[in-house]
Image (cartoon, rainbow, N blue to C red):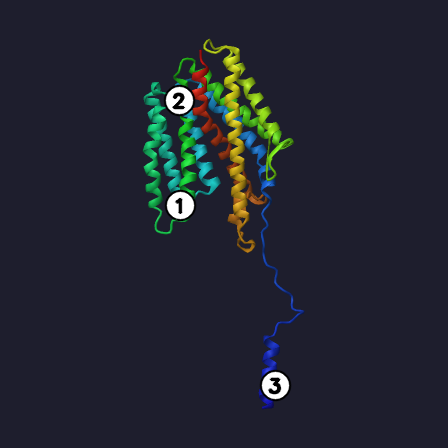
C-alpha cells in the first residue's frame, strides 16, 4: 500500500502543472488598422493614376490602333490587380472571364465603332453565362460563391467599360474627347489621393481616410483639364468643355471613394479572423506594411482601385461628351 501511495504521489507531481514553469508564447500577428493601411496606399494610387491617365490618354490621342493598344494594356492591368488584389475565390476562372470580356469588348467595338456603346452590352451578354459556368467548374466545395460572382462581375463591368474609349475615339472630335476623358479622370484621381494623403479633411468615415475636401479639389482639377483640352474643339464651347471635365472628374472621384470603402471593408473582414489564425496570407489581405507581400498587396489594391474608377467612368463620360457636344 505504501508503495502505491508513493507511486501515485510521484505521478501527481509529474502530471500536475508547475506554477513556475515558463509558458510558451503564442505567436500572434496583429494586422494594422484599416485607416493606416488605406492611408499608406495614397501615394501608390496617385502614381498609378498619373501613369495610367498619361499613357492611355496619349495613346488614344495618337491613332485608333494605339487607342486599342492603350485600352488593352489598361484592361490587362485592371484584371490582374483586381483578381489578385481582392483575392477573388476561383482566381483562375476570374482571370479567364476578365480576359474574355476584354477581348470581346475590344473586338466588337473596333469592328463596329459607329454603334456607340452597343458592342459593350453585347460583350457583357456573352461573358455573363461564362461567369456562371466557371463558378460551376470550381468543384463541389464552392466557398463564397456569391462573393466570387459579385467581385468577378464588377471587375468584368469595369474591364468592358474601358473599351468605350475605342468607340469615343471614332466620334467627331473623338481624339480630343478621348484624351480629355482619360486625362480628366487621371487628374481627379491624382489630386484626390494627394490631398487625402496630406489632409483627409471632412472624412466620410472615420476608418476610411477619404474626405470631402479632396473630392472638391479633384473635381476642380478635372474641370481645368477638361477646359484646357476641349476648349479648342469646335463642338464644345468653353462652358461645355469645363462642364465635361467637371462631370468626368466627379464620377471618377466618387468611384475612387467607393473603391476605398471596398478596400477598407476587405481589410476589416480579414482582421476579424481569430488572432491565432492570422497567417502571412491574411497579413497580405489587410495590407501589412511589413515585408514584400504587404507592399505587393498595397500596390495591387491601389492599382485596382484606380483602374476600376477609370474603367467605370469611361461609359458615363462618353454619354456626357455626346450630350454636351453642340
> Residue at (60%, 86%) from the top-left corner?
5
Q: Position of residue 291 (x, y in %)?
A: 57, 45
Q: For residue 197, which quarter of the picture?
A: top right
Mark 1 → mark 3, Cα distance in angstroms: 62 Å
Q: Earlier in the sequence, mark 1 or mark 3?
A: 3
Q: For residue 16, which quarter of the picture?
A: bottom right
Which of the two marks, 1 or 2, is nearer to us in this view?
1
The residue carrying pointer 2 sits among few (fewer than 14), some (14 to 19) or many (20 or more) residues within 10 Å by Cα, namely: many
Q: Nearer the viewer, residue 126 or 74?
A: 126
Mark 3 lies on residue: 6
Mark 1 lies on residue: 145
Taking 72 as reference, is 233 above or below it? above
Q: Is residue 186 visible?
A: yes
Q: Earlier in the sequence, mark 1 or mark 2?
A: 1
> Residue at (40%, 41%) from the top-left corner?
149
Judged from the image, the secondary structure of the residue bearing numbered disc 3 is: helix
Question: Outermost residue toward the right?
Answer: 20
Q: Nearer the viewer, residue 2 or 70?
A: 2
Judged from the image, the secondary structure of the residue bearing numbered disc 1 is: helix
Q: Quadrant of the N terminus?
A: bottom right
Judged from the image, the secondary structure of the residue bearing numbered disc 2 is: helix
Question: Outermost residue toward the top?
Answer: 234
Mark 1 → mark 2, Cα distance in angstroms: 33 Å
Amino acid at each position: 500500500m505504501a508503495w502505491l501511495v508513493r507511486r501515485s504521489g510521484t505521478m501527481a507531481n509529474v502530471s500536475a502543472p508547475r506554477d513556475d514553469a515558463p509558458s510558451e508564447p503564442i505567436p500572434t500577428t496583429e494586422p494594422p488598422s484599416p485607416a493606416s493601411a488605406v492611408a499608406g496606399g495614397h501615394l501608390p494610387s496617385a502614381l498609378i493614376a498619373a501613369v495610367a491617365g498619361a499613357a492611355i490618354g496619349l495613346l488614344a490621342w495618337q491613332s485608333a490602333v494605339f487607342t486599342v493598344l492603350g485600352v488593352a494594356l489598361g484592361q490587362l492591368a485592371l484584371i490582374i490587380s483586381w483578381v489578385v488584389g481582392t483575392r477573388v475565390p476561383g482566381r483562375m476562372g476570374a482571370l479567364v472571364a476578365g480576359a474574355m470580356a476584354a477581348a470581346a469588348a475590344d473586338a466588337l467595338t473596333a469592328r463596329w465603332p459607329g454603334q456607340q456603346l452597343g458592342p459593350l452590352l453585347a460583350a457583357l451578354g456573352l461573358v455573363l453565362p461564362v461567369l456562371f459556368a466557371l463558378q460551376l467548374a470550381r468543384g463541389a466545395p464552392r466557398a463564397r460563391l456569391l462573393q466570387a460572382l459579385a467581385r468577378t462581375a464588377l471587375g468584368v463591368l469595369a474591364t468592358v467599360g474601358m473599351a468605350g474609349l475605342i468607340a469615343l475615339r471614332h466620334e467627331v472630335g473623338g481624339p480630343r474627347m478621348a484624351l480629355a476623358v482619360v486625362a480628366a479622370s487621371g487628374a481627379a484621381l491624382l489630386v484626390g489621393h494627394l490631398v487625402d494623403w496630406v489632409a483627409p479633411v471632412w472624412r466620410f468615415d472615420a476608418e476610411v481616410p477619404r474626405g470631402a475636401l479632396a473630392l472638391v479639389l479633384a473635381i476642380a482639377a478635372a474641370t481645368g483639364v477638361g477646359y484646357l483640352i476641349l476648349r479648342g474643339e469646335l463642338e464644345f464651347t468653353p462652358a461645355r468643355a469645363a462642364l465635361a471635365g467637371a462631370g468626368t472628374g466627379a464620377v471618377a472621384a466618387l468611384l475612387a471613394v467607393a473603391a476605398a470603402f471596398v478596400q477598407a471593408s476587405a481589410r476589416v473582414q480579414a482582421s476579424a479572423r481569430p488572432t491565432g489564425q492570422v497567417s502571412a496570407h491574411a497579413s497580405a489581405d489587410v495590407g501589412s506594411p511589413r515585408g514584400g507581400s504587404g507592399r505587393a498587396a498595397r500596390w495591387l489594391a491601389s492599382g485596382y482601385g484606380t483602374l476600376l474608377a477609370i474603367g467605370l467612368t469611361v461609359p458615363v463620360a462618353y454619354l456626357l461628351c455626346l450630350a454636351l457636344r453642340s
